[in-house]
Amino acid sequence: MIQLINPSTSKNLETQKNYFREPNLGILYLAAILEQND
């Protein structure tokens, strides 16, 4: 899941925008970032 929304991949910049359109997916995206920072 984290790989699909990995912010380090420019390819997924468009995907990130799609995630933020859906609140639940946006939360998953933010959770993935927090996991990467641990």
Image (cartoon, rainbow, N blue to C red):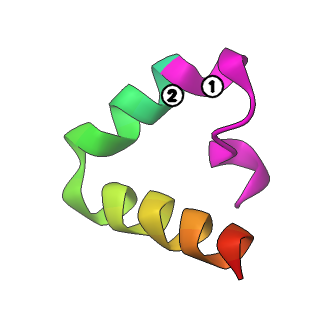
Q: In this rendering, is residue 4 above or below 2?
A: above
The one nearer the camera, 19 or 7, is 7
Give residue 9's quadrant in the image: top right
Instruction: Name the secondary structure under disc 1.
Output: helix
- Does residue 35 appear left or right of residue 29 in this picture? right
Vertical position of residue 13 compared to residue 3: above or below:
above
Q: Residue at x 35, y 67 (%)?
A: 27
- Estimate how packed mark 1 is, as few (under 14), some (14 to 19) or many (20 or more) residues with alpha carbons within 10 Å: some
In the picture, measured across the screen, residue 28 lies left or right of residue 11, that is left
Amino acid on which the number 1 mark rests in the picture: Asn
Tag on residue 12?
1
Which span of residues is magenta-colored? Answer: 1-13
- Does the magenta run of residues contain 12? yes
Task: Bin the neighbour count of mark 2 within 10 Å (Cα to Cα): few under 14, some 14-19, many 20 and up.
Answer: some
Q: Quadrant of residue 17?
A: top left
* Residue placed most toward the observer, 37 or 10: 37
| Residue drawn at the location 68% of the way across and 72% of the way down | 37
Q: Residue at x 73, y 35 (%)?
A: 8
Q: What number is the disc on residue 30?
A: none
**Cα gap from disc 1 to disc 2, whole angstroms:** 5 Å
- Image-quadrant location for residue 30: bottom left
Query: Which one is nearer the viewer's eye here, 5 or 7?
Result: 7
> x and y percent of residue 38 in the render?
71, 83
Whole-percent x and y of residue 28? Answer: 46, 67
Residue ID for mark 2:
15
Q: Horizontal placement of 6 versus 21: left or right?
A: right
Quarter placement of the N terminus: bottom right
- In this rendering, the answer to whether 8 lies above or below 27 is above
Mark 1 touching mark 2, by CB under 8 A? Answer: yes
Q: Position of residue 12 (x, y in %)?
A: 62, 25
For badge 2, the amino acid type reads: Thr
Q: How many marks?
A: 2
